[in-house]
Each structure stands twice: as C-alpha cells, then as structure tokens.
Amino acid sequence: MSTPAPIIVHLHIPKNAGTTLSRMLKLRALLHPPTNVLHRDAVLGQYRKPTEGRLAAIDGMSAADRRRVRFYEEHCGYGVHEHLPRECRYLTVLRDPIDRTLSVYDFLRQEGRIPADQTLGEFLDRPTIRRVWWIDNAHVRYLAGEHGDIIDAPVGGCPRALLETARSRLVGQIEWFGLTERFDESLLLLCERMGWSATATIRSNVTKARTSRRDTVAPELVARIEGMNELDLELDAFARRLFQERLDAIPNAAERLDHLRAHAGVVQRVLGPAQNLAISLRDRLRPRERGRMVDSVRADEDRGSG
C-alpha cells in the first residue's frame, strides 16, 4: 500500500486572501485524482463540520477515510498538525499589517458584526472582537501558536520573543507562504514549492465596501495601528525579503509568471461567473447570519473570514 501524501494545512489568517487560496486548494485536492470527489468530506478534512468539532470528526473516521485526508484548514495557530493523522505541510498567506487591520475593520462593519457607525478610532479602542480577528500582531500570534492555539496574550502584550519564533517557523516549518499584495508571484512560488505545473484561482470573498485605506485614514490612526503591530511590521519586512529571495531563485521566473497570469485570466473569465452564481444561489438557500455582534459568537470562528 502506497504511503499517502502529506496533508496540506492551510493556516488561514482572516482577510489575507485566504478564501481565494482555500477554494483553489480544495478544488485541486478533489481533482487529483478525480475519485477524491466521492469522498470529499474525508479528503477535505471534514471541512463542513463546525471548527470546534472538525478534529474530533477526523479522529472518528475509519482508518481508510483517515488515509484519504488531503487538506485541512482553520483559523488556528501553528501546531494543529499534532492533532492530524500524519505528516503535514503548512501553507499560509501574509499581508501588510496596516492594510489588513483596515480591511478587517471594513469587513466587520460590512457584515454587521460591529456597528456600521463605529469609527476606526473606537474600533482600535476595543480591538479584541473575537480571538481569530486579532488586529495587534496577528501574524505573529498565528505563526508562533502552540498545539493549534493562537497566542492569546492581552492586546499589546505579545512578548517580543514570539517574533523570533514566527520568523523561525516561516523559514523552517511553513512549506510555503504568499503575500496578498503579490498574489500572482505567490502562486508561482506555490507551484515551484509543491511541484505543480500550473494553478489558477478565482478571487473570492473580497471586501466590497473598502472605505478605509492608508491614504484616506488620518495619519494619527495609521501611526496608532503601526504601534499596535510593531512585531508584525518587523515580521513583514523579514517575510518580504525572504519572499523576494525565493522568487529570484526560480529559473525563468518572468516567463513563467506571464504564462501563469494568462492561464489565470482564462480561468477567471470562464469559471468566475459560474462561481459567483453558485455562491449567490448558496447564500439564497442558506443565508449567512449577518448583523450579529461578534463578541457574542466567539465559537463561530470561520464564517465569512477569508
């Protein structure tokens, strides 16, 4: 009996283009080989189960189904592999910490999860909306996590030692990371790292009402967000240098990137409308709950958080 491939673990940090990546990875896992579609709950790591019951559901599967697990994702800290059936390969996406914070703010207002009239300043006064939505050093909190738990230090209380842990994991334990702002190059690196000939995505779950951007927000609020994300900003600078080094090491990177973009454009034109229609029909048949304040729904960790 052949040894099953390592499980791809998507360490999904909210508002970092994770939903776009997730849908691409799920589709790939199901189509290679196509028979995986017949066992999609097992192959995708019981993805339809609520977050708090997903690992237990995997643990309760038959031995044959546990061997079929190819993909697992969650808004969780590093170390979740300790709870999964076999060797894992971590993937994640990072984003400029300032832009991410502003995107989180806009998204939560758009979804009715915080009051629509709450100002950015008021939001920053009370930033711990729910533990997956950290806006102070969120990347460090996720990457330096232990046993699958996100670092739960008080706002402004992340120990500086966690930065070195996050850096070390980014280099040695995270198989691949991408950058939201350089998503096409990120996909090229993903193909190179995973040995794939090509891949393409359809942009998903983009915050529609982006009103808060670095150039439209008061400078004192931008400075405040920078102060809240001192560790993440250092990690971001480190990650971008590492990203560029890896990109520079790819032979014929520019030519391959052009090919990937052309392929992605075709996929977007052909499949994009179909995906949008499917999501629209799903939302009509199973409407997402909106308008609930997220402080009262701490257990519901991954509804609409790509």
Image (spheres, grey):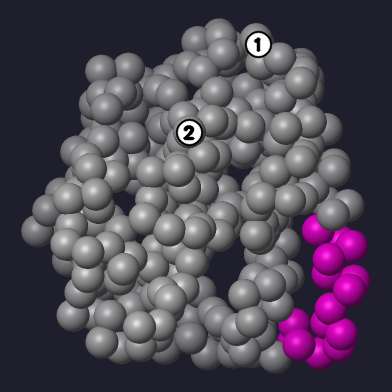
Q: Earlier in the sequence, mark 2 or mark 1?
A: 2
Q: Position of residue 39 (x, y in %)?
A: 20, 74
Which residue lies at the image location 54% right of the left edge and 30% below the top edge?
146
Is the residue marked by circle 2 packed among few (<14), some (14-19), or many (20+) residues within 10 Å? few
Q: Amino acid at mark 2?
A: His
The residue type indicated by label 1 comes to Gly
Q: Position of residue 104 (x, y in %)?
A: 51, 35
- Badge 2 is on which residue? 147
Q: What span is colored magenta in the figure?
A: 243-258
Residue visible at 25% across and 52% down in the picture: 58
**Callout 1: helix, strand or loop?**
loop
**Given contact means CB atoms under 8 Å apart, are the residues at marks 2 and 1 in contact?**
no
The residue identified by callout 1 is 156
What x and y, as percent, mark residue 270? 42, 88
- Most extreme residue toward the left is 285
93 up-or-down from 272: above or below: above
In magenta stretch: residue 244: yes
